[in-house]
Image (spheres, grey):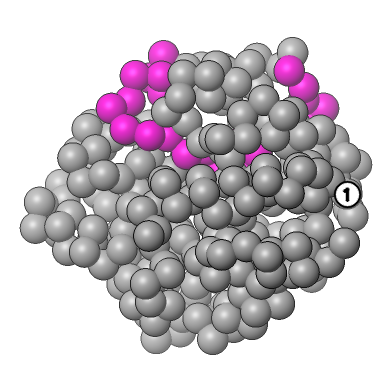
Amino acid sequence: MQANSDVSRMAGPCDCHMHIYDPRFKASGHVPPRHATVADYRLIQERLGLERVVVVQSTAYGFDNSCTLDAIKQLGANARGVACVNVDVTDVEMERLTAGGIRAQRYVMFAGRPIGWDSLVTMAARVAPFGWNINLQLSGEELADREAMLSKLPCDLVIDHIGRFTAPADSNTPGVRVMHRLLDAGRCWVKLSAPYHGSKSGPPRFEDIGALARELVQRWPERLLWATNWPHPSVKGEAPDDLELFKLLPEWAPDESTRRRILVDNPAKLYGFS
């Protein structure tokens, strides 16, 4: 089944995680050697048949959210964003970012991260009144040590890339069990994206990480989002084919109504699309 023909019957399918790298904005970190402007992304949207998008601040821009805000403005009413702000952010700046379409604070728990675990609880309380969530990317194995903290956050939690577990991982893996408990609590969301992270079986189907995705779909379809992770900034060499990755979703979620929930209803609820 062609992924774009599947979504052609839906109104408002959303890509919930992608990045823009625009040479007009100065980067202080790694920029992938691939064209990744708004104009480039629109070609991906058209190819996949997507209408809505969540632009995620790249770590390359640190706390300067100018590139992300500019991308949201270019993409219009069907765009929202995930920013990265420091602990000393003012209410005025939070209001400006919210007006610009930002709906989440990003945490990336890998080398070069601009902000770390020690601030997460404080920042969750800081962003909650503005309707933001905490968008967390980490090695899924870390969840086993962070459950107490994450389960008490005063805002929704969004976990990137099926948890970024390293295969083999299943429902007996401590971090996977924590992710499942967080989902059971009703304030956590998981992005079905980037199955290449941690996969040992590899392309085209990434069966090992795909098994985690299928279990999530079976048990928590109301808590799932889908995303491209375009332009796949941590992938070295040739980037994955976005359409081929999109075609995995019907394998994980064979029921069309479930796919509609993941692609349309869930992101509309979380990010405030009308």
Quarter of the picture containing the N terminus is: bottom right
**Quadrant location of residue 240?**
bottom right
User: Could you tell me which secondary element the residue under label 1 belongs to?
Assistant: loop
Front position in the image: 224 or 100: 224
Q: Residue at x 67, y 43 (%)?
A: 258
The part of the image, by quadrant, that contains residue 95 is bottom left
- Point 27% across, 52% down: residue: 85
190 relative position to 24: left or right: right
Magenta region: 148-171
Compared across the picture, whether 145 is left or right of 73 comes to right
Residue 206 to residue 61: above or below: above
Amino acid carrying mark 1 in the image = Arg
Which residue sits at x=39%, y=52%? 271
Give how far across and how far down residue 261 sits, in percent: 59, 46
Rendered location of residue 93, percent (x, y): 15, 59
The x, y position of residue 235, in whole percent, is 71, 60
Magenta segment's dominant SS is loop
> Is residue 186 in sight in this rendering?
yes
Residue 8, given in percent of the width and then of the height, sits at 69, 69
From this viewpoint, is residue 231 visible?
Answer: no
Q: Which residue is mark 1?
A: 205
**Residue at x 51%, y 45% (from the top left corner):** 266
Q: Is residue 204 left or right of residue 11?
A: right
Q: Is residue 169 above or below residue 100?
A: above
Indicate yes or no whether the magenta region holds residue 226: no
**Relative vertical location of residue 259 with respect to residue 187 in this rendering, above or below:** below
**How crowded is the residue under tag 1: few (<14 C-alpha within 10 Å), some, or many (20+)?**
some
192 vs 171: above or below: below
Image quadrant containing the C terminus: bottom left
Classify residue 199 by image quadrant. Answer: top right
